[in-house]
Image: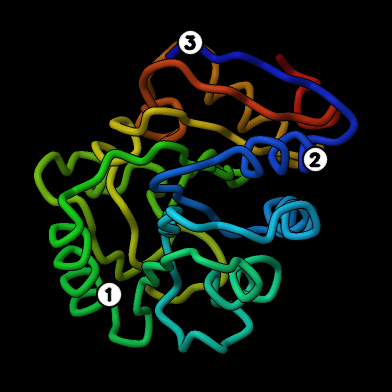
Amino acid sequence: MNPDFRISDDPAGAAATLLEAAAGHVCITGGSTPKEAYELVAAKRDDWSGVDFWFTDERCVAPDHEHSNFRMADEALLGAAEGATVHRMKGELGPVEGAADHEREYEAAGRPEFDLILLGMGPDAHICSLFPSDPALGEHDRPVMGIETPGMAPLVSRITFTLPVVNASRSIVFLVTGDDKADAVARAFSGRRDPTAPASLVEGEVAVLLDEEAARRL
């Protein structure tokens, strides 16, 4: 991995700028800082014709549940994104059927390589719903997997894209903020591949949008 660190007092704004220019297949993530980015770009861009939105992962809850990544993104951006096609992970189907359903949708779309994928990172350095030392990290064939037991709260099953899909993306962007992520950032971008820090397994050229707190151990 060759990280391009971009440290600022407004990483959500930097992510919004990248999203504003995005086209093609765009994969977005959950979290409070991404929500801020989505709200910012929603105020700047209303025509999303030709953009297909996908999700890095989803919790196995109904789409209107408070823990749903779709609900957050829909309220912050997608509900006002005119012309966009949204590929929702159907978490309400459960991890097995939900993953199979989304894999079929991904296959039907031609297994697209994402033109932009926005990744968050947990304090344990997980990405998507790929948690430290989980067997799913070694999956090379299936693009989508169900995760029965996540590595952190909320302790509900998940659906997630796998590492080969992440690593095939044309533009990979991390958005990480907060002092509680500083240790994870240091482990993820140490230059050593470490299954206990799944973010370190991302490959290629990546942009890393950080605030000072998250970057303090670099």
Q: Are marks 2 and 1 in contact (CB under 8 Å)?
A: no
Residue 2 horizontal side relative to residue 18, left or right: left
Q: Amino acid at mark 1?
A: Pro
Question: Mark 2 sits on what residue?
Answer: 13
Residue 85 horizontal side relative to residue 142, left or right: right
3D distance between C-alphas at marks 1 and 3: 33 Å
Residue 87 location, quadrant: bottom left
Determine the secondary structure under disc 1: helix
Q: Is 202 in front, or is 138?
A: 202
Question: Mark 3 sits on what residue?
Answer: 2
Number of residue marks: 3
Q: Which mark is residue 95?
A: 1
Determine the secondary structure under disc 3: strand
Residue at position x 86%, y 36% in the image? 10
Q: Are marks 1 and 3 in contact (CB under 8 Å)?
A: no
Residue at position x 25%, y 45% in the image? 112
x and y, in percent, of residue 97 in the image: 19, 79
Residue 77 horizontal side relative to residue 165, left or right: right
Q: Which mark is residue 165?
A: none
Q: Is 32 in front, or is 48?
A: 48
x and y, in percent, of residue 126 in the image: 48, 44
